[in-house]
Amino acid sequence: MSAQSGSVRVGRGGRRVAKTSIYVLLTLYTMLALGPIVLIVMNSVKTRKAIFDSPFSLPNAETFSLKGYETVWERANFPRYFFNSFTVTVVTVALVLLLGAAAAYALAEYRFMGNTFLTLFLAVGVMIPIRLGTVSILKLMVTLNLVNTLVALILVYVAMGIPLAVFILAQFFRHVPGELKDAARIDGAGEYRVFSLTLPLVKPGLAAVAVFTMLPVWNDLWFPLILAPGESTKTVTLGVQLFLGQFVSDWQAVLAALTLAAIPILILYVIFSKQMLSGITQGGVK
Amino acid sequence: MTAKSTNNDVVKGTSAKRRKFPRHVIVFLGPALLVYTVFMVYPLLDSLRLSLFSDEGAFVGLANFAELLPGGSLSSSFWNALGNNLVFFAFHLLIQNPVGLFLAVLLTQQLLKRGRGTYRTLIFAPTVLSVVIVGFIWQLILSPLWGVVSTPLLGLTSTALPTLSMMSVWQFVGIPMMFFYAVLVGIPEDLIEAARVDGASGWKIFWKIIFPLLLPMLGIISIITYIANLNAFDLIYSVQGALAGPEFSTDIMGTLFYRSFFGFQLQSGSTAMGATVATAMFIVILIGVLIYLFAWARRVESYEL
C-alpha cells in the first residue's frame, strides 16, 4: 500500500532529512487536528479557576473537579438524548441497509422495463440535498401527525440514505458472479432465497453504506431542530446545542457536555476506523 | 448498466415474453422507492411548486423570486448570504484541497515506514465529530475570556466569516486527504520509476505525472464540497445563532433559508419565502454542478491505470 509519489532523489544524508521532515510535518498536523479536542477533554475535569489560570496543564489532585459533569447530569437529560440518537441511528441504518440492498439487488440483477429510468431516478438523490425539501417535509409531517416523533426523523433519514446506498450496493452486486446465483436457482432456491444468499458476499459494501449513513444521521442538527425539538425526542446533537446555548457562561458544564458528546463517537471511530477509512477510499474510487 | 439476464422468467422468455414487472422485483424495489419518493422526491418537487404560490395559496408566478432581486424585500439578505456562502466555499477550495493533497502526498511517501495508518486515523478524527461540537470547541478556544487568542475573531465582522470557514476546513480536511490518498496508492510504481530512470526530478514527476492523474478526483471533491457548503447551516447556527452575526457577516444560504421559513425576531416566517429561498439554493447548486460537468469533467482526461 505505498506509492512513491515524487520522493525526492537525494543522497543518504538528504534522505534522512527528508524522512525526518515527513515525520515532523505529519506529527505537527496531527497535533493541530487533535490538540483542540484534547484541550477540551482535559479541561472538562478541572476546577473553574484552573480552566482559566492554566488551560494547557493537565489536571492534578488540586485542580481536579467533576463539577461540570454534575451540572450536566442535573440540568440536562443526556441519557434520554443518547437513547434517542441511538434509536434513530440504529433503526435508520438497518432500514437503509435492508431497503437499499433489496433495491440495488433488483436493479443490478434483473432486466425489466424502466430499469435504467429507476436507476437514474434514485441516482439523482445522491446529488440533491434533502434539506431543500424541508418546507414540504414539515408540512407532510404535520399532516401525518408525526411532528416531535422519532419516526419522522427516521423516515427522512431513510429517504436521504437510500440513493447513496443503492448507488454503492448496485456496484457491489454487479461484481457477484452469476454462476453462484444460477447454481442456487437450479437447486430450487426462490428469488428471495437467492438474494439472502448473495447478501454476505457484498459485506464490504454494506459496511461502507452503514458508515456513510450513520455519521450524518448521528451528527445532524437541522432535522431534529425542525421536526423533533421536543424534550422527549431531542437527539444528542440538538440536546448539546441547546444546553451549550443556555450554559455559555458555565465553562465547566460546557466543557463537560462537549466531552460527553464527543467521546462516544470518537471511541466508535477508533474501533471501526479501519473499516471506515477503507469504506471511504473504496466508495471514492468506485 | 447492463443487468444480467439470470432471472428465470427473463431467461425463458428472452425478449419476446419479457415480463414488465415480475412480482419479486416489486417486492425488492417497492419499499425503497416508496420511502424515497414520499419523503424526498415529493417534498423537493413540492417545494419548487410552493415557491410559485403565496402563503395564502394563490398562484403568484415568479413574484416570490422578485423579492430576491434588487428592489425586493429579501434582496440584500439574499445576495449577502450568497456572497458569504461563496467565500465560505472558496476557503474550502483553496485551503482544504491543497492541504488535504499535501497530507495525502506525505502519507504515501516511501520514506514513511511506520505509523502511516495511525497518522491517517488521527488526522481524520475531527471529521467524524458533529459540526455542533466542532463549532463550540473552537468557540471556547477562540474566546477572549480564555485568553488563548486575544482578538475576538468571531465577534468582528471582518474576521468572523474567515474564522468559521477555517473551523470547517479544520474539521473536513480529512475527506480530500482520504480521497487523494486512494488515488495516490493506485498509481503504479513502474510509472514513477520509468520517469525517474529518464532523469525526471521529484518535483517534475509530481507535476507532470501525478498531478494530472489527480485532476478527476480534484473535480469530484470540489463539487461534493460545493454542494455540502451551499447546504451548510449547523456550524453558523451553533456558533453565531440564526441571525448569523455580527451584523449578518456570517449569514449563508442555510441560515437565510431557516430565517425566511421560520422567521426570527422582526422578520416573520413564510412558507412561500422558505420554499423560494430553497429553490434559489437548488438553482445555485445546479449551476455549480453544470459548470463542473461541462467546464471541468469534459476537459479533464481520466486515465485508466
Image: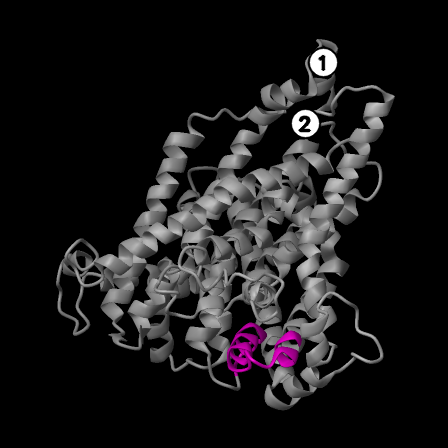
What residue lies at 13% left-to-right and 65% top-to-bottom? B59
Above-or-below relation of A132 to B269: above
Q: What is the span of residues highlighted in magenta in the rendered image?
A: A233-255
Mark 2 — on which chain does it sit?
B
Mark 1 — on which chain does it sit?
B
* Residue A20 horizontal side relative to residue A276, left or right: right
Q: Residue B167: which quarter of the image?
A: bottom right
Amino acid type, callout 2: Ile
Q: In x, y percent, where is residue B78?
A: 28, 57
Q: In x, y percent, where is residue B35?
A: 45, 64
Q: In x, y percent, where is residue A209?
A: 61, 55
* Magenta span contains residue B81: no
Precedes in sequence: disc 1 or disc 2: 2
Task: Please tell me which residue lies in front, A86 or A9.
Answer: A9
Q: Main secondary structure of the magenta part?
A: helix
Q: Write down the residue under mark 2.
A: B187
Q: In x, y percent, where is residue A91?
A: 59, 71
Q: Any mark on residue B194, and which?
A: 1
Question: In whole angstroms, how far apart are the C-alphas of marks 1 and 2?
Answer: 13 Å
Amino acid type, callout 1: Ala
Query: Which image quarter is the C terminus of chain A in?
Result: top right
